[in-house]
Every structure is written in structure tokens, then in C-alpha cells.
Image: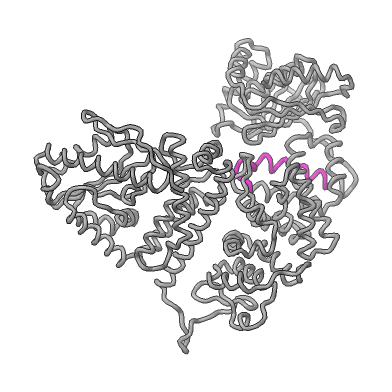
Amino acid sequence: MTRGPVPVTTGTKRDPSPPVIAGIGAAAREQRAAALDAWLARLLAGGLRDTGIAPDLANARGVALIAVGGLGRRQCAPCGDLDLVLLHAGVPGMDELAAALWYPIWDARLGLDHSVRTIGEALSVAHDDVKVALGLLDARHVAGDAELSARLVDAAADQWRRTAVRTLPGLREITVNRWRAHGELAFLLEGDLKEAAGGLRDVGLLRAIAFAGISDTLRPAVRAAHVRLLDIRDALHQSLRRRVDRLLAQERAAVAGLLRLEDGDAVLRRVAGDARTVSHALDDAFRAADRLRSGRRRGADGRPQRRPVARDVVEQDGELVLARTAIGARPDPSLSLRVAAAAATAGLPIARATCEWLAAYCPPLPTPWPPAARAALVTLLGAGPGLVATWETCDRYGLVDRWLPEWTRMRSLPQHNPVHRYTLDRHLVQAAAEATRYAREVDRPDLLLLAAFLHDVGKGLGGDHSLVGAPVAARIAARVGLPPAEVALIEKLVRLHLLLPDVATRRDIGDPVTISGVGEAVGDSTTLSLLHALARADAQATGPAAWSDWKARLIAELVRRVHTRLDTGLLPDPPAPDPALVAGPLPAVHLEGDRVAVAAADRRGLLAAVAGCLALHRLEVLAADASMVEGRALVEFLVQPRYGTPPDPIALAADLRRAVSGDVSVTQRLRGRALAARGGGSPPRVVWHRAAATDAVVLELRAADAGGLLYRVTSALDEAGAQVRAARISTLGGDVVDAFYLVGSWPDDAERDRVEAAVLAAAV
């Protein structure tokens, strides 16, 4: 896509600065490069004249200015940096000339990566630093001695061609480390367009590998993907008016408008598709380099050596290919799945020619699938670390769409909940990979893998994705060939896959009503164990914000209690209160790890006072319980640092004692901090649950997260005369779902309305 570049402003003679040229597309990038070239040439000419090295550019013997990076490729982003090399042939006065060049660039507020070198110095650094070697492949003469520039460009290219094969292993290691740090652009909801796998930096690697003659990496599809990624970066720079490469969710709509795309999701889908193209090409290029470096292994007859891996599958030159007998015979419909299963299990890539052959000649799977195909799918999903790369390869060549027609809808589908790191398709594959950790904990590991892979198939269809996705998962399970009882179990697992985490974080798991309700919904211990494993796999595939030690403990305790109910029909005894709080002087404070417990003589206002004090010390409350034991009011909180650094325990304990004793100074500090921390966003909402507890009703508050929210709400409840015996705090990105157990039946509508109004006023 090309947009007409629009000149915005130019520099003055007194304060020389480069022209600012807006616009998206190849023409705008070329025009920006031309304008920068002209400006830099003027700077060099002035510097040569001022330092007495040469009267003008025409007489600049032995001095040249070379651009590398984006300017060297003439792919200048609207707010990009400059990468420049001041090249010389031993000419004196280079320090003064460099200052005459660099300072005007800095004065113009441009980012600058610069160096001053001779040809020999540049080649020596490139020999020792692969990043410099790659940069010199983009070197382009800007101004000065063109012959000197040409000598460096030719020498750098020749040196790269001679050393590339033995240099690439080190380059690959650097690249893999970068991928680990930045993730995969094709699957990230907020990826770095430059540094993530499949991004613009990887295109530079493809260009370098092609330059060395190792592989034909820059095919038309790669070139087109590169141009589109550059356009998206241009639009991102232009919308923000600053240099930034990470495409955040809130920026996608503006980028979509500049690119004339439908919406932000369309931008994300385009990025995902283009990043996939780049990543696949780079994988192929690295494998080609490996083969070239190691040489082909041949037998005594001169043919390439082949090692059997599975039925119809052999390994050749580090890749999986089809056995000759498989190519000559009528293909089995399960062949593509069996090849994928063998690749994932062996941790070897499938050769490109094999993928193309399978896409062209492997017949479609019948309905229901034959046992061999079903077994291969389970083996593939259970391959753990090998699953993701193999699945992506199969998806690249259209094999996945032939196995699962529903996959087209889910590919690159954004997930708008901020706790999610990946697009939907990658999340499902990652969940199956994570589920292999728990395969030995369940009676049916095969059904666990399938449920993990299908648990979110309802997303994008509207409505509650658990309810909408359950029949979709059932249809897929039936097509795969599962018997009716197992199809029903897959449907149940998908429908209930959020039950355990939701109940554990939003309900009192010590309440008999909670345990009985979960037991009735689950039905049996086998299903409960499968749901427990599925919940963990789902959370770990979602991202760091979706899982923590406290959540794992809550779910595990819930599962233990429900298991007891299902296996014996009895409810486990509630945990005994801390003996240190039941006896001894009041107020009593006990701090241990992520647990804060306080005992006082009076219950009124205790929960709010402790909650506010915790907020004052930047502790995020995850759960709270209040009770009366032997005439003492006890409150126990499960907490975690809001910003990662725990507070001073001595100061926290002192403030807690003052707060629960009614110290006015502490109360004022709490109110000041709480008022300053009020959140925004959509209006809060209250939902009542009348039958969710044994001796209470549950008031559920859904609101924007903010420091001090729990303090304000519990204070409002206390002032309204509501007695809170438990609270569960669930944070979902920027929102919270807080459940408060209000003692009593609360049958009166007017009383509920009064309390609800107080809570909503406190949450605004």
C-alpha cells in the first residue's frame, strides 16, 4: 500500500534540520530517505569546509558518509533513527568532522547510532561482531568519496559471503535469545514489530542469508509481507508522532484508520499473517544453512542416508520426509497427521517438499476419522514442546484446515481480555502443550489433551464462549471418532472449564453450599481431576497474569474439598483459626508470607480498616475472611504486593494495630490515599446471588481496578449496616470481580437497593 507523502516542514539555514515528511508506503519512505540524504550531504559539506579538510564534496578525497540500517535500505520510518558511518582513509581531523556532523543531528532530536572508521577497522569489527557485519550489508553511499564507499561495500559483502556459513550458528543463537525475550509476533496481542520473531529484524536476517547465496529466502510472499510490516510501522509512528515499534492494543484502531483497514483486529490479523510468512522463511533458511555447513550424509551407494522414524516417515538431513513406499502407494487419509505426530514426537522439522506433497495429494479424512488418524492427533497434541512448531508448519501449508475446518475462523483471532498473551489459535495449541504436564494425574490423558485443545473454540461466536463452544467441541470430537460417552465428556469439560478458577477466586470455598454446588456440577471424581488439569493448562497458556501461587493453592484446596464430597459424601472440616489470634492481648497482628491476620475486640469497621491499611502499603487483597471466635473478631487476608516489592513488615504491623484501634491519623491517611486512587472506565455493576452461600447472600461487584477500592467498598458496607463475613477479590486485567458475603438472607428489595447504591457510589 502506498500513500502520497506530504511535506510538513523543513529546517532553516540558521538551525539546520531534516525535512519532516509524513506518509505511509514505499514512496514516502523513499522520499524521506532522499530528503535525509540531501540534508546529511549538506552537513558533511559544511563540516569539511569548516574543518579545512576539503572545500566541498567534490574534493572530499578519502572521506565518505555511509548510511546503514533503514536509511541505508531507503526504508525510513517517519520517526526512525539514523545509523551512520563516517568512513575515512587516514585523513586527519576526523574527530572535529564527526562533531560537526553528529551535533546537528542530535540538535534535530534524531536518534543516532554512529561510528568513525577506516575500511580496515570496519571490516575488523564486522569480522568479530555479526551484528555489524549484517549492518554493513545495508551500507549505502550518502556523500563524499564515492569510490571509498564502494570499496567498503564490496569488501564487506565479500567478507560476509566467505564467512556466513560458519557465522550463522552464532547468529542463530543470538536470534533465538531475542525471540525468547520478545516472543512470536504472529501470536502476540501486543508484539514488537521489529524485535519479535517474524518481525522486521528477521527480514534483515533473510536478506543476509540470501546475500550469502545459501538459500532463496526473499520470495515474493516474503517481500510482500515485509512491505506490509513496514507500512504498519509507518502508520504506528505517524499516529503516535514518535518512534515506537510495539503495537499496543489501544493503538490498533488508529493504525487501522491510516491503513484503511476495517478495525484493529484486521491490523492484528495482517501482522499475524505476515509474521508467519517471515518466520517460516527464516526457519527454512536456517535449516538450509545447517545442511550446507554439515554436508549431506550419504551411504555407500551415494544416496542420502535415511533413518526410519515412524511408519511411512524417515529422517533425511535433519528433516522428516516420506518413505518411498508412501509416495508410490495410494495415500492413507491419516498420513498427514501421522507425519505431524512423528515430527512433533521426534522434535524434527518436516521438509518443505513433504509438506507440499501432503497438501497436494493426501486425501481428506472421512467422517468419523479412522483410528489411525485419531491416535495420531492424540500423539501430536501430547508431544509437549514439539507440538507448537509442528502445528505451525502444518498450518502454514493448509493441512490444519483440512483436518479441522473450524480452524480458519480461529486463526489469528485476537483475544481482547488483557490477561491473554496470544491469539486464539496459538492459545489452544499452547494449552494442549501445557496439558501434557498433567497427563499422569488423570485417568484419561487423551481426553485432557483434546479438551485443552478445544476449550475455547466458542470464542468469536458471540455469547458465553464456554456455553457456545461446548456443542462445537462435541461436533469436532464426534467427527474425530470418539464414542458418544466421550463426546459428552468433552462437551462437559469445555462447558465447565472455567468453573474451578471462577469458584476458587470468587466464592468462599469453605462454605458447604460452594462445595456441594461444584460437586453437583462436576458429577464425579474423574471429571473433577480432568477439570483441575485443564484449568492449570488453560491458565499457563494464557499468560503470567492468569496464574499465580495463590490461585493454584485456592483451586487445589477447592478440588480437595470437592473430592472429599464426591468420594465420601461428607464435607471437610473448616480450618481452625490461628491459635495466636484466639489468645493473647488485643489487637493482635500476625504476618506470614502472603497471609495477614488481625484480631480485635470489636467487629464493626475491622474489615474496612485492615483493607485500607493494606492498600496504604500497596498490598493487593486476593481474599478476605471475617469471623467471631470466643468473643474476638478475626479477619484474615491473602495478599500480594501490587507493584512487586513487599512492604516493611514492621511498619505494616504498626499501622495495622493503630488502624484497628481507631487511630485518627491512620484513618485520614487511608481516606486521602483512597480518594486519590479512584479508577475510571465503564460504570460499575452489582449482581446479587441469593443461593450461593449457607448463611449469607453474595453481592458481586464488577468495577475498574483501583488502589483502595476494597477499603472504600467495605467502608460503605459497614456504614450501611451490612456484616461481611468473607470477600473474594478477582482481578482480570484492569477490572475486578469482588464478591462479598453479607450475613443474612436480605429478603427486602429496598434494603438491597440501599446497600447496592452505597457500594456503587464507593466504586465510582
Viewer-nearest residue: 388 or 742: 388
Farthest residue to the bottom: give it.
301
- Classify residue 344 by image quadrant: bottom right
Viewer-nearest residue: 718 or 94: 94
- Classify residue 475 by image quadrant: bottom right
Q: In this view, does 315 lie above or below 674?
A: below
Name the dominant secondary structure of the magenta segment. helix
At horizontal 63% and vertical 10% (from top left) the residue drawn is 664
Read off the magenta span: 541-564
Q: Position of residue 718 (x, y in %)?
A: 75, 17
Q: Position of residue 724 (x, y in %)?
A: 78, 23
Q: In this view, does 703 lie above or below 156?
A: above
Q: How many circles with numbers are drawn on the protein?
A: 0
Q: For residue 556: magenta?
A: yes
With 684 as the anchor, is 478 left or right in this view? right
Q: Can residue 207 be seen in this view?
A: yes
Q: Is residue 331 above or below residue 460?
A: below
Q: Where is residue 53 in the image (x, y as percent from the top left)?
A: 10, 43
Q: In this view, does 329 lie above or below 598?
A: below
With 516 as the anchor, is 169 left or right in this view? left
Viewer-nearest residue: 29 or 667: 29
Q: Position of residue 163 (x, y in %)?
A: 31, 65
Farthest residue to the top: give it.
664
Quadrant occupied by the C terminus: top right
Q: Is residue 385 visible?
A: no
At horizontal 57% and vertical 49% (from top left) the residue drawn is 269
At horizontal 84% and vertical 56% (from top left) the residue drawn is 488
Q: For residue 303: magenta?
A: no
